[in-house]
Image (cartoon, coloured by chain):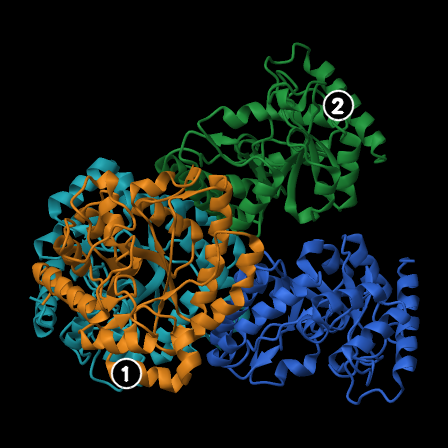
Chain colours: A cyan, B blue, C green, D orange
Amino acid sequence: MLKGLSRAGLGEIGSDERFIALAAEYGFQTVDIDAKGLIDRNGLEGARKLLADNGVTIGSIGLSVEWRASEEKFRDGLAKLAEDAAAAAALGCRNCCTYILPATDYKAAHFTVLATRRLRTCAQILGAYGIRLGLEFVGPHHLRTAWANPFLWTMHETLDWIDAIGEPNVGLLFDAYHWYTNGHTLADIEALTPDQIVHVHINDAPNVAVEDVLDNGRIYPGEGVIDLAGFLKALNAIGYRGSVTQEILSKEAPAADAATLLARSKAGYDKVYQAAGLV
Amino acid sequence: MLKGLSRAGLGEIGSDERFIALAAEYGFQTVDIDAKGLIDRNGLEGARKLLADNGVTIGSIGLSVEWRASEEKFRDGLAKLAEDAAAAAALGCRNCCTYILPATDYKAAHFTVLATRRLRTCAQILGAYGIRLGLEFVGPHHLRTAWANPFLWTMHETLDWIDAIGEPNVGLLFDAYHWYTNGHTLADIEALTPDQIVHVHINDAPNVAVEDVLDNGRIYPGEGVIDLAGFLKALNAIGYRGSVTQEILSKEAPAADAATLLARSKAGYDKVYQAAGLV
Amino acid sequence: MLKGLSRAGLGEIGSDERFIALAAEYGFQTVDIDAKGLIDRNGLEGARKLLADNGVTIGSIGLSVEWRASEEKFRDGLAKLAEDAAAAAALGCRNCCTYILPATDYKAAHFTVLATRRLRTCAQILGAYGIRLGLEFVGPHHLRTAWANPFLWTMHETLDWIDAIGEPNVGLLFDAYHWYTNGHTLADIEALTPDQIVHVHINDAPNVAVEDVLDNGRIYPGEGVIDLAGFLKALNAIGYRGSVTQEILSKEAPAADAATLLARSKAGYDKVYQAAGLV
Amino acid sequence: MLKGLSRAGLGEIGSDERFIALAAEYGFQTVDIDAKGLIDRNGLEGARKLLADNGVTIGSIGLSVEWRASEEKFRDGLAKLAEDAAAAAALGCRNCCTYILPATDYKAAHFTVLATRRLRTCAQILGAYGIRLGLEFVGPHHLRTAWANPFLWTMHETLDWIDAIGEPNVGLLFDAYHWYTNGHTLADIEALTPDQIVHVHINDAPNVAVEDVLDNGRIYPGEGVIDLAGFLKALNAIGYRGSVTQEILSKEAPAADAATLLARSKAGYDKVYQAAGLV
């Protein structure tokens, strides 16, 4: 499994070009960045060279389409989605991800219907370029009541939703934090096949009651209470071979400089990968 | 548009064979019955002859699959669905319908996801036989709170659901009672194309506040306050040419004998068709 | 049914803006033009005003995606397809069409597989904007052997293909010339529902053996041997209400000026609409 | 990877019940049999016990639907398909397979269109029970001209067809013989993900020119010239963990008794698994 980085948890790390160089310097193999932006600034060959020279690939792009609001906004994003997908494919990235808020101010059944159709359309456009769509279920309890009506937040609900969307290229973005806050188990991971997982996020949780864990209270891998060794071991055992990407959402931006934060991230990965027997 | 009958509102009318004969006698052109049962009892040729001799066709069969409960029950019904569809197709019927309760005891988003996938599977099986699936939205206000969580009840929500199901052979079962209790307008009908309508139900509502109209308080066409002339005119204007089938749900079974009830139904149809200029 | 024009048969008619004005002047109600180009040149409001001032709408846009060649070319067109669809939708046009050559230099089965998937993707993107995709089967016999391997050319084959594509928003572009050269009948039209027809082309054929009719040997409606009165009558009878658009493909561009050709087209429409009892 | 048996190559092995017992006796872990038949004869609990007592599971059921002939025959099989799928699911089998003849007497493009839609329907019904559909491409050269028109026979064509079918639960039945006769390589296997493979067949080919290899000239694993060690190693490396099932089609039924043939099969498996480093 590849060690990956997103910007979340690295403070002010600067341009994507610098992000790529620093990720490589600290031993990471993938970065989550905007493929189209990289090509726009560097040209296709320049972007390919930049990644190749640093020995880094793109773990996942983010879904730029706004699928949670009006139909007009949704449609407005589809041409760009095709361009995003073309850019990702041109750089060898096969993954695009979005997250699912566990509650909604819309009437839940009607929003489900609209979102099912919209995410299917996104998956179809991505699929034309060989890109998969990863859906991230979001576990922290406080978010379940942060909007008027409950939506979907467990792994099993999300797998059911993926069935309802019905496209072959849709799977999970599997985040350790949401696995933990949902109270899911190692057996839940072991019941998956690797193709059900598009992308993985890793991070850790403080030692508080699971019901009180805050979405923006995440800490670095290996510094908290989540069984990340078991998490990684199980993912590896079922045959997952993609990125395991750090995502640390916190209330305030980390104060340290990028080098310090990267070193801390690297130490966290080394610790949990070793604990999982993955070295 | 064809004049059609269901059993609802006709009291103890007896076997389907008798129902067919009586429908024909009172000038109706379609009946909603179980196609497979008719063939099982009469053989395919016998069933065809019975319908042909009476000049009657089948308006719609009912969806026998239980899609609102457990996965096991759902699956248990799929083989029979294929047989139902084969029987309907063999008798020239292209329609199969089910109704949507406007509330559910399940978590709404998750139930939506499951039901979307299940109804898609039903539509796919029916589609293999050239049969369409009609979804009936249900308008009476009291039912919206009869179960714990709100589901879908308007025409527009149901059209959005049909988009989410995503199969070419799914449309509306359009019931005058639910059109009325939702406060929908003639313009709402005029905005449809005929292929969006699989089947039509007709009945009337008593002169009470629309919020107080009860699902099982339906009366015969032309005896209440629904603008059935406008309803029929609009359906005809957009090009709908299928059945308009009576469905009178009432708290207690009607006391009169079948002949009286059929005569009353016929009088109701004559009145509203005439008012709509359809004679 | 709306009287429509394409550029084919009108010689050098100039800009789309002039085409719209001339179409209106000669009593036509729709034009087949590039919606995105019209907006690019006139702005959205300008394009809307231009159409409204002339009492003209867009009958259909053309499918700009290259679905018959390499995968790379296919993908390259998808972002523009989303923009084309957005533009068409913004101008109230719901139709996008492409034609099917009746033979191919590719291995037929493999090309069918690729084209099925590609046209499905196109339909999915169009469907996100409420646009339908019309597939035009092409009948002239000489084209069936113009490439190495036979493909699809009849209405029934094309309807089967539409089933295989499997999206709700795909139908026929129904061209009188291809109906005639296939030897299809009025009963073939009468067996359709209006939603199976996205768009209609009209033109006429010279009095030669049907096997010798050339694709680029088309003449003006009413000047040849096709039973256009029956054709129009049948389309109207099944409830088709969209455009009937002239398309005259000829070996050499017509020599006359636009005014002469428009007057000739208008006379042809008047004749065949009258013969069909549509005035 | 599980060692599996089909009846092909075992001569007159008797009932499925005996087949299960003998497979277990000779160290095989899966059998390809009719799940529904096993339940019909033994009851669900009896069938489960029989398999469990012998430590054997079902590798794959066969697709009983006739999808290569008339529409009527196709439809006639769908109810049974639902029953087959329910039976397989009840016995823990997730796979159903069919083969693709590399030529057809039908017009190739039209047959492709019909078969795409029919196999999609089969996949949809199977999918409702959690069963996958495996498509077996067939490589021997002589079959490519055994019917009038070429169809599909390579792995890549079949993957493209799977995309066109468009259901998440369709993949390959990957047969060593067809891999060999197509001239496919180890790199072709290594480019797959395990979820693209539903089932695997193993067998060997005599030492003749690859163009002259006959479909019914198969021999036991390890007795011929196919690089089965490489084949198995590559499948294992990409993460395939399902059955590798022997299928020996020969012109005449093998003359030896079942025990001899089973011992010979076992020896073949031991040899090629060992050569692949899989022990």
Q: Quadrant of residue D98?
A: bottom left
> Residue drawn at (85%, 34%), measured in percent from left and top?
C279
Q: Nearer the viewer, residue D190 or A31?
A: D190
Residue C132 image offset from top left, x and y in percent? 58, 45
Q: Quadrant of residue A28?
A: bottom left
* Crowd band around label 1 with a 10 angstrom C-alpha radius: few (<14), some (14–19), many (20+): few
Residue D65 image offset from top left, x and y in percent? 47, 61
Q: Residue furthest front?
A: D255
* Crowd band around label 2 with a 10 angstrom C-alpha radius: few (<14), some (14–19), many (20+): some
Amino acid carrying label 2: it is Val
SS label for mark 2: loop
Above or below — where is B16 with respect to C49? below
Residue A274 image offset from top left, x and y in percent? 7, 71
Q: Quadrant of the C terminus of chain A?
A: bottom left
Q: Nearer the viewer, residue D87 or B176?
A: D87
> Residue drawn at (53%, 43%), measured in percent from left and top?
C86
Q: CA distance from mark 2 to mark 1?
A: 74 Å
| A243 displayed left or right of C249 | left
> Residue drawn at (16%, 72%), measured in percent from left and top?
A233
Q: Which residue matches tag 1? A: D52
Q: Quadrant of the N terminus of chain A?
A: bottom left
Amino acid carrying label 1: it is Ala
Above or below — where is C219 with respect to C130? above
Residue B89 image offset from top left, x and y in percent? 66, 62
Of circles 2 and 1, which is in front? 1
| A142 displayed left or right of A227 | right
Q: Count all numbered tags in the image, as a single digit.
A: 2
SS label for mark 1: helix
Q: Residue furthest top?
A: C255
Q: Which residue matches tag 2? A: C225
